[in-house]
Image (spheres, rainbow, N blue to C red):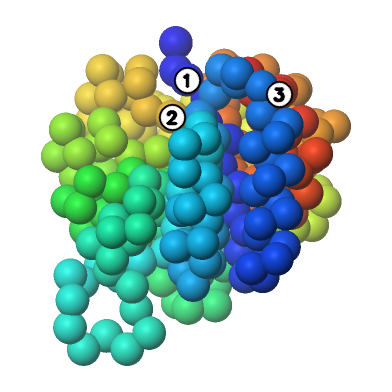
């Protein structure tokens, strides 16, 4: 049985005051939940949120990192810097980074390797655009994105990643994949991991992301290969985030 993970992706949202209120609301409403919970926050707020979540079941995540260890990479943040602030998870290859920052599959693979070497858990995002889905290319695109990452990893390393299936057309649009559509892709992704190691495939967590909300979370999370959610908009409202956590528990 895979323990579910609900991770909030705050994207470029927040302020010192808003973060404090949001984390307080989450901590207040958290029951003895039976799933893992993370918040992936903008880099400048890592220290603040590290202190806010200390001693609670909520763990800290980041939204990106450099593949490089240190040096002349202006604006970048390394895995070891994230680690110093207690970061456990790092989102890699989010579709917004692929679209707006030209991140290639190879770059995502290199970042994944660097994260694992530093002891972070990469949340590796994959997903197809609407055009790709309508052209019947979903499995090729999404499976291909994951294959490039898997090819860069040993079996032991592959066992330490989390995959997030995030159809691009569902992110921030209010359109969600139906549970059946998502399950089909998740099963395909698990089979891709299975081509590397059946043991890893049975254990790897595959999250769904894309307009997951309190009113659709339960049905999505009930599917056999959906092991949690990567939550954007709904992670910015404590009651919504808590309702999704409840649905996962
Ligand atoms: C995301 O950005 O990872 C995401 C899933 O966003 P939303 O939930 O807002 O669609």
Q: Are marks 2 and 1 in contact (CB under 8 Å)?
A: yes
Q: Is residue 209 above or below residue 242?
A: below
184 with respect to 237 (left or right):
left
The spot of residue 119 in percent (x, y) is: 23, 46
**Crowdedness near tag 2: few (<14), some (14–19) or many (≥20) residues, C-alpha within 10 Å:** many
User: Which tag, 3 or 1, sits closer to the chain's start?
Assistant: 1
The spot of residue 5 in percent (x, y) is: 52, 31
Question: What is the number of the mark on residue 117?
Answer: none
The quarter of the picture where the C terminus appears is top right
**Crowdedness near tag 3: few (<14), some (14–19) or many (≥20) residues, C-alpha within 10 Å:** some
Question: What is the number of the mark on residue 205?
Answer: 2
Which mark lies nearer to you, 2 or 1?
1
Rendered image quadrant of residue 26: top right
116 with respect to 166 (left or right):
left
The spot of residue 246 in percent (x, y) is: 71, 23
Q: In what element is the residue under mark 1?
A: loop
Which mark lies nearer to you, 2 or 3?
3
Question: What is the number of the mark on residue 3?
Answer: 1
Residue at 67 percent of width and 70 percent of height:
15
Residue carrying label 3: 246
The spot of residue 137 in percent (x, y) is: 55, 50
Q: Alpha carbon of mark 2 to alpha carbon of mark 1: how far?
A: 8 Å
Q: Is residue 188 above or below residue 224?
A: below
């Amino acid at each position: 049985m895979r323990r579910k993970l609900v991770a909030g992706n705050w994207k470029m949202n927040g302020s010192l005051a808003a973060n404090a209120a949001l984390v307080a609301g989450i901590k207040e409403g958290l029951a003895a939940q039976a799933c893992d919970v993370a918040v992936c926050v903008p880099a400048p707020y890592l220290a603040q949120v590290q202190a806010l979540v200390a001693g609670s079941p909520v763990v800290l995540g980041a939204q990106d990192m450099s593949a490089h260890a240190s040096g002349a990479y202006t604006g970048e943040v390394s895995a070891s810097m994230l680690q110093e602030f207690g970061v456990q998870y790092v989102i890699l290859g989010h579709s917004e980074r692929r679209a707006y920052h030209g991140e290639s599959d190879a770059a995502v693979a290199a970042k994944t390797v660097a994260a694992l070497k530093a002891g972070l858990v990469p949340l590796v995002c994959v997903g197809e655009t609407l055009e790709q889905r309508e052209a019947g290319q979903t499995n090729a695109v999404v499976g291909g994105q994951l294959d490039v990452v898997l090819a860069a990893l040993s079996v032991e390393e592959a066992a330490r990643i989390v995959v997030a299936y995030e159809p691009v057309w569902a992110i921030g649009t209010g359109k969600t994949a139906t549970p059946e559509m998502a399950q089909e892709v998740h099963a395909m992704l698990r089979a891709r991991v299975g081509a590397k190691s059946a043991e890893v495939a049975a254990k790897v967590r595959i999250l769904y992301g894309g307009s997951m909300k309190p009113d659709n979370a339960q049905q999505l999370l009930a599917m056999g290969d959906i092991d949690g959610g990567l939550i954007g908009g709904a992670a910015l409202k404590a009651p919504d985030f808590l309702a999704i956590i409840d649905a996962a528990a």
